[in-house]
Image (tube, grey):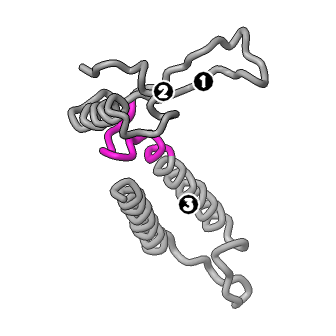
């Protein structure tokens, strides 16, 4: 839950920042001058405003992209930034059926070790289903 609340807070911060930039644009740039006593629209009829709104849109999309990218690079349980991705396998021997795998590591902290230990203890005592027990048999004692 903390993971999604943090993501929501980042998106709210992006929206508030973009609203502040939008208000700043309206205060700093003058309104377009009338043409033949007819009011001119800001978007589509005034080149400066059209260009600025295009750049504003691209900047907003970039901020949302950065927020999503940053969220994907965080641990779902503790929100710490993950390390660089590790590649396993060989790109020279890659086929469509067995492409190289990529995983992202996180430095182990005490709360992560507790989860590993409890999973390992459950596998040793037989309180766990067979596929998970077989998966955890090769882990050994953590530490």
**Which residue matches tag 2?**
134
Say which residue appears at 60% left-offset and 24% top-offset: 101
**Which residue matches tag 1?**
101
Kindly give the residue lying farthest to the bottom in the view shown.
37
Judged left or right of residue 97, residue 136 is: left
Residue nearest the viewer, comparing 6 with 47: 6
Say which residue appears at 49% left-offset and 34% top-offset: 130
Mark 1 surroundings within 10 Å by alpha-carbon count, few (fewer than 14), some (14 through 19), many (20 or more): few
Quarter of the image holding residue 70?
top left
Percent across and percent down for residue 106 are 36, 30
Say which residue appears at 60% left-offset and 55% top-offset: 58
Disc 1/disc 3 C-alpha distance (Å): 38 Å
Kindly give the residue lying farthest to the top in the view shown.
92
Residue nearest the viewer, comparing 107 with 19: 107
Q: Is residue 37 above or below residue 57?
A: below
On the rendered image, what quadrant is the C terminus found in? top left
Q: Is residue 114 above or below residue 59?
A: above
- Magenta stretch, overall SS: loop
Quarter of the image holding residue 45?
bottom right
Magenta stretch, residue numbers = 69-82
Label 2 sits on a secondary structure element that is helix
Judged left or right of residue 117, residue 86 is: right
Residue nearest the viewer, comparing 5 with 37: 5
Judged left or right of residue 57, residue 29 is: left
Percent across and percent down for residue 78 are 30, 44
Label located before the other in sequence (2 or 1): 1
Please name which of the two marks, 1 or 3, marks the residue nearer to the observer. Answer: 1
Say which residue appears at 40% left-offset and 66% top-offset: 12
Q: Is residue 87 magenta?
A: no
Q: Which mark is residue 56?
A: 3
Kindly give the residue lying farthest to the right in the view shown.
96
């Amino acid at each position: 839950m903390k993971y999604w609340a943090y993501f929501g807070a980042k998106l709210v911060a992006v929206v508030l920042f973009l609203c502040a930039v939008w208000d700043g644009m309206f205060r700093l740039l003058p309104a377009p001058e009338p043409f033949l006593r007819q009011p001119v629209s800001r978007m589509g009829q005034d080149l400066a405003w059209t260009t600025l709104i295009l750049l504003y849109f691209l900047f907003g999309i970039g901020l949302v992209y950065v927020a999503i990218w940053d969220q994907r690079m965080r641990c779902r349980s503790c929100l710490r930034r993950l390390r660089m991705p590790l590649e396993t396998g060989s790109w020279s021997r890659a086929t469509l059926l067995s492409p190289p795998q990529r995983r992202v590591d996180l430095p182990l902290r005490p709360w992560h070790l507790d989860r590993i230990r409890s999973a390992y203890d459950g596998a040793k005592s037989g309180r766990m289903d067979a596929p998970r027990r077989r998966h955890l048999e090769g882990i050994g004692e953590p530490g």
